[in-house]
Image: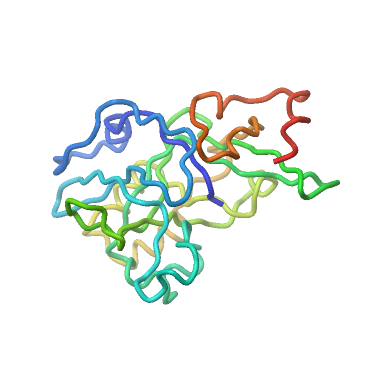
Amino acid sequence: MCGRYSIYESMDYYLRQLSLDLVVINGYDHEPINRYNVAPSTRVEIVRQVGGRSSVDRVKWGWSPFWAKGKRPDPINARAETVVAGKFFKGLWPNGRALAPANGWFEWIADPTDPKRKQPYYITSADGGPLFFAALAEVHHSLEPDERDGFVIITAAADQGLVDIHDRKPLVLSPEIAREWMDPGTTSERAEEIVEAGCRPAHDFRWFPVGKAVGKVGNQGPELIEPVSEENRQGDLEL
């Protein structure tokens, strides 16, 4: 986790849910984002605080420090257990804190009788509200995309029923904790506490099987997050 996710409301919607009393310093599209299948290395909206104001930036999902560029694909996730003290993300911690708004994410479960056959599941909030993934980002505002730019989503160990879907989950924050996470005034010690224990619990989510079309990066549309029936699942187990 997390290798695909959805973000399809307008950015205004996510900002309202955060109840941020801050001016947005850069323009953004007020139309629905309609990204039902965000894949690694694509550019997608994240939210940061810069100088006491909010900044909405479209940034590549994936990041590496300069000394690791080109040695392997840029990681898209950072493990909560190592992100604080590890060398790899030292350039982002703790001042690169950001949020990746979302509506849900996808995981694949292998068929116990044939590991090559997998069923995709969609995980979203039980109450229908938005999700806010804790992220770390590097962003440079310029006319052309900067190859240094990118972000990673922090992941934590899954708990309760979510373990049946995957042993990892994104570090999903409540709006209150999300505001604290973004606040430049939050100390690194408090940020570390959020990484360790700030994730929303498993009972805040629901999950269900979806069609195999999400496995193709180019596919988009609300049908990707529609539950599939038991008989249709049989055809989806070939992902």
**61 lies left or right of 124:** left
| Residue 169 percent across, percent down from the top left | 55, 50
Q: Give residue 86's position: percent from left, percent from top.
A: 44, 74
Instruction: Say which residue appears at 26% left-offset and 46% top-offset.
Output: 57
Give the image location of residue 115, x and y in percent: 78, 50
Q: On the rendered structure, is 138 left or right of 27?
A: right
Residue located at (43% from left, 69% from top):
70
Quadrant for the C terminus in the image: top right
169, above or below 31, in the image: below
Is residue 67 or residue 125 the one in the foreground? 67
Tell me which colouring the rendered structure shows.
Answer: rainbow
Figure label count: 0
Front residue of 162/31: it is: 31
Frontmost residue, 202 versus 112: 112
Q: Is 212 or 226 nearer to us in this picture?
A: 212
Residue under the image location 50 percent in, 34 percent down: 125
Would you say 84 lies left or right of 210 here? left
Residue 27, picture quadrant: top left
Most extreme residue toward the right, as rendered?
113
Please tell me whether residue 27 is drawn above or below residue 47 in the rendered image. above
Q: Position of residue 112 (x, y in %)?
A: 82, 47
Which residue sits at x=49%, y=31%? 220
